[in-house]
């Protein structure tokens, strides 16, 4: 659905993931309805008079003190939201950092040169077992 932005303001809000920017806006098509939306890569260039495409799945309502408030969510897979939540993103970053530290620790304990050839350790031929026959499988 196409909407034309008639009013738009941006403010900084504190969230559990840190300070984020958020729009408050109205559309020409719904002049008495205020909406909000977190600013992300998908909507950071919004301006008054601009026509924007918003799917009905992006509209999300919530009730607070007897009033209904509307939020516009990022489209699925959009940069800056929709695809992965910030909580999931931060969790993945933390897991990656922990893994990188573990790999670094493992690499620091490895020898700088190539591992020795097994023949240098055990000799050219494997040790012979007593009473072993060449045509038998020993297990």
Image: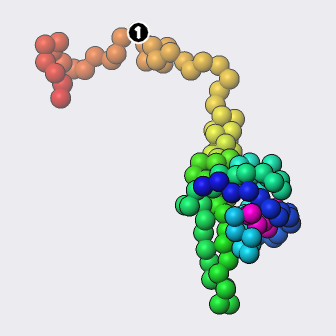
In this view, the residue in front, 41 or 103, is 41
Vertical comparison of 131 with 12: above or below = above
Question: What x and y, as percent, mark residue 83?
Answer: 59, 51
- Secondary structure at badge 1 equals loop
**Quarter holding the N terminus?**
bottom right
Q: Few, some or many C-alpha atoms within 10 Å of disc 1 (few <14, some 14-19, many ≥20)?
A: few
Q: Is residue 23 on the magenta stretch?
A: yes
Vertical comparison of 79 with 70: above or below = above
Q: How many marks?
A: 1
Vertical comparison of 15 with 104: above or below = below
Vertical comparison of 19 with 99: above or below = below
Q: Is residue 16 on the magenta stretch?
A: no
- Residue matched to label 1: 124
For image coordinates 56% across by 61% down, the residue present is 56
For image coordinates 59% across by 48% down, the residue present is 77
Give the extent of the magenta segment.
21-28
Residue 122 in view of the camera: yes
Question: What x and y, as percent, mark residue 122?
Answer: 43, 18
* Horizontal side of residue 33 vs 58, given as left or right: right
In this view, the residue in front, 63 or 25, is 25
Question: What x and y, as percent, mark residue 67?
Answer: 67, 86
For image coordinates 67% across by 77% down, the residue present is 69
């Amino acid at each position: 659905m196409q909407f034309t932005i008639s009013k738009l303001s941006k403010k900084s809000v504190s969230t559990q993931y840190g300070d984020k920017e958020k729009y408050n806006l109205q559309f020409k098509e719904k002049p008495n309805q205020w909406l909000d939306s977190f600013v992300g890569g998908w909507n950071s260039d919004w301006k008054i008079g601009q026509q924007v495409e918003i799917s009905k799945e992006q509209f999300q309502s919530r009730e607070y003190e007897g009033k209904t408030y509307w939020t516009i969510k990022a489209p699925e897979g959009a940069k800056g939201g929709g695809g992965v939540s910030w909580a999931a993103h931060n969790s993945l970053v933390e897991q990656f950092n922990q893994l990188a530290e573990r790999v670094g620790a493992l690499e620091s304990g490895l020898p700088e040169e190539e591992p020795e050839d097994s023949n240098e350790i055990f000799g050219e031929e494997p040790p012979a077992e007593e009473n072993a026959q060449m045509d038998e499988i020993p297990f």
